Amino acid sequence: MNKTKEIWIAGFALFSLFFGAGNLILPPTLGVKAGVDWWIVVLGFIITGITIPILAIFAHAKLQGTLYDFGKKVSPAFSTLFCFLIYSIAIAIPSPRTAAVTHEMAIQPFFDTPPILTSIVYFLLVFLFAVNRARIIGLIGTFLTPIIVLILLVIIGLSFFVSPGILGASGFENPFIDGILEGYQTFDAIAGVVVGAVIIISLDDSNHNTFEAKRTLIRKAGFIAGTGLLFIYGGLILAGALYASTFAENASRTEVLAGLSTQTLGNFGTTFLSVLVALACFTTAVGIVTGTADYIKGIFNNSKKAYIITAAIASIIGIIVGSYQVDFIITVAVPALMFLYPITIILIVLNTLPDKYASKLVFRGVVLVTFIFSITDFLGFIIPRENLTGIKSSIPFAEDSLGWVLPALLVFVVLNLIQKKEHP
């Protein structure tokens, strides 16, 4: 296959594996709430919704191993626990959420069927794709992603011409921070460390045997995927802002996206949106289930039986959780995100840096501090926030659920200065 064509197919596949339920329903609602500050929200959303996930792909290009390699410099026990938590959350929340979104937006408007039926059929297909994983990149990158991109571009393009075009006042106190935190809900940092491993293994299966060849292809594919996400996210957020006046104040995320599609594509809007939702969500679910099964397969000496059993268990969990409403799944996800996302971000960043700046000591110190200072963010969604006011007021950015950022940066700098002094 032509190398340029192969890079574009891999880039489209990465884009599609990232672009799932959260990526569809979050940006338009952000735009509706942001109003005139839509571009500030975009800047924040880019950090956690694009930059960090693509850095995860670059880290995979550097490591060319499994998710376990992301945390092994901290300790084998930590890395094992981290992998368990990542894969458990991935198959318990973002993967099932794709089925819930598909039901609410692609099935419910046309058929009076229960959500559990949608979940069963949906994850049966996911399982079939997962056990035939050798064709994932080619199928997704060649056929599914171009369809997704085309439909999205039509919706975004038409919104500029047929929308009211009136930008209202912002509903956010700090749109930049809100953009960052809403990017958590895409789960793309977690998706980056999970589906990046899928790309590595799939490239191995397609006879890309040299380290450099794989690194070059993965980096270029990551750049293509990141650029695509930037244009789509920015366009959907702006479209939401342009149509803000047409939605009720308490409109749900799925209602905003459905309304945006209907107003831009008319009577055919719902049909187009149904295809878009089904494709975007399905590819993400396949990527998550495949990535989880790959990891377990590696633990059991590349056992195909372990791969199939894991894919089956992940699909069963998807059927159960995916039968709940989207808003419920999103709400349940917040504490888990606040606990795991900061550590995931730090591991991604450290693994993209040159080794001389990311020694075992730096890994251990920065990860430990990140964990300690993110505890208040996690607890803030479990116990009354007023009980944590005293602690949060003493930590910079803690009120914005980013109290771990400055301490982690400070420890990173200090430990590198100490190492430089000891080993000039």
Image (cartoon, helix red, strand yellow):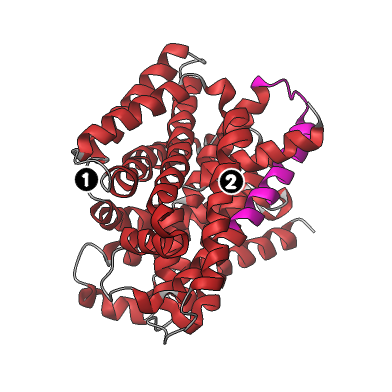
Closest to the observer: 62 or 404? Answer: 62
The residue beneath circle 2 is: 15
Closest to the observer: 187 or 389? Answer: 187
Q: Going 74% across and 60% down the picture, which residue do you hit?
A: 420
Answer above or below: position of 91 versus 233.
above
Residue 21 spot, x, y in % from top left? 41, 49
Asked if residue 365 shows in the view, the reply is no
Closest to the observer: 163 or 310? Answer: 163
Residue 69 spot, x, y in % from top left? 57, 37
Name the main secondary structure of what is drawn in magenta.
helix
Q: Quadrant of residue 412?
A: bottom right
Q: Quadrant of residue 395?
A: bottom left
Q: Quadrant of the C terminus?
A: bottom right
Residue 301 belongs to magenta span: no
Which region of the structure is painted magenta?
205-229
Helix, strand or loop for disc 2: helix
The residue beneath circle 1 is: 324
N-terminal-most mark, 1 or 2: 2
Residue 219 belongs to magenta span: yes
